[in-house]
């Protein structure tokens, strides 16, 4: 499952300070907090109080007490500025077109209820730039989507890295080995992780791991 995969790639350890910047219903946050053995601090952020309220119920039910929730006014909320450079690891599971789940949910492609692709690209870039401010030197930033589109994935990361020389990309095989202590599947190649339904028999999924120098 994507939330478990992202949590593993983030590699959070007990005692660290971690942000799930687009926490949504809290599935990824749960996986991260569990990986930390309920020790340390996880901040689950979202612009929706309703989503975070539902997430809080899940956290309580799971018996996890190292999670805080924070409703943001936008990705540029004042809390981000106040908290700059104070977190060991930050996850951005960005809002996206969802093309990676079309095989499992084919009706989704015909629904035009959300922002256009151009609007999503602008929002993703803004979210990534803002979330990156939270990462302390030596800390980890993970950008992920459930999209198959390079514009939302590799190109977003490349654009971010070009504008932020204090961040460097960690090859996905290296990040996986560090986090999981086992080699990455040979079918997954390249500097970033891009899973596709046709090749990997999974939902479409993308992730890139970066370190702040």
Image (cartoon, rainbow, N blue to C red):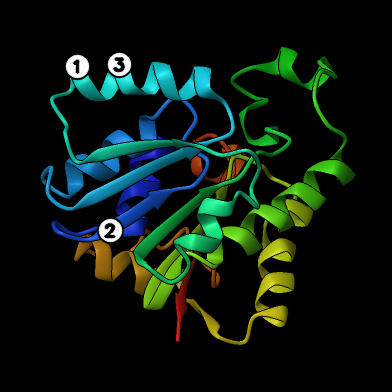
Would you say the residues marked 3 and 2 are in contact, meaning their CB atoms lie under 8 Å apart? no
Residue picked out by circle 3: 57
**Crowd around label 2: few <14 · some 14–19 · many ≥20 (10 Å):** many
Quarter of the image for residue 148 reads top right
> Which label sits on residue 61?
1
Quadrant the N terminus occupies = top left
Name the secondary structure under disc 1: helix
User: In x, y percent, where is residue 207?
Assistant: 52, 56
The image position of residue 33, as x and y in percent, is 23, 42
The residue that label 2 is drawn on is 17
Q: Position of residue 163 (x, y in %)?
A: 72, 79
Up the image or down, 113 lies above or below 11; here it is above
Q: Residue 27, relative to residue 17: is it above or below?
A: above
Q: What secondary structure is found at the residue carrying circle 3? A: helix
The structure residue drawn at horizontal position 59% and vertical position 39%, both measured from the top left corner, is 146
Q: Are marks 1 and 3 in contact (CB under 8 Å)?
A: yes
Dot 3 or dot 2: first in sequence order is 2
Side (left or right) of 74 relative to 194: right
């Amino acid at each position: 499952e994507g939330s478990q995969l992202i949590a593993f790639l983030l590699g959070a350890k007990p005692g660290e300070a971690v942000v799930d910047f687009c926490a949504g219903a809290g599935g990824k946050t749960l996986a991260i907090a569990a990986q930390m053995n309920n020790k340390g601090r996880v901040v689950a952020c979202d612009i929706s109080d309703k989503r975070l309220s539902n997430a809080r119920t899940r956290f309580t039910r799971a018996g996890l007490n190292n999670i805080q929730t924070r409703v943001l006014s936008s990705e540029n909320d004042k809390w981000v500025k106040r908290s700059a450079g104070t977190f060991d690891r930050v996850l951005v599971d960005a809002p996206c077109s969802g093309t990676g789940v079309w095989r499992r949910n084919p009706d989704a492609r015909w629904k035009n209820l959300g922002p256009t692709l151009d609007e999503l690209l602008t929002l993703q870039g803004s979210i990534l730039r803002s979330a990156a401010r939270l990462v302390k030197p030596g800390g980890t930033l993970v950008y992920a989507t459930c999209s198959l589109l390079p514009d939302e994935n590799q190109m977003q990361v490349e654009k971010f890295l070009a504008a932020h020389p204090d961040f460097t990309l960690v090859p996905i095989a290296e990040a996986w080995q560090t986090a999981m202590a086992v080699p990455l599947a040979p079918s997954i190649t390249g500097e970033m992780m891009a899973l596709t339904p046709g090749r990997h028999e999974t939902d479409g999924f993308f992730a890139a791991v970066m370190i702040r120098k």
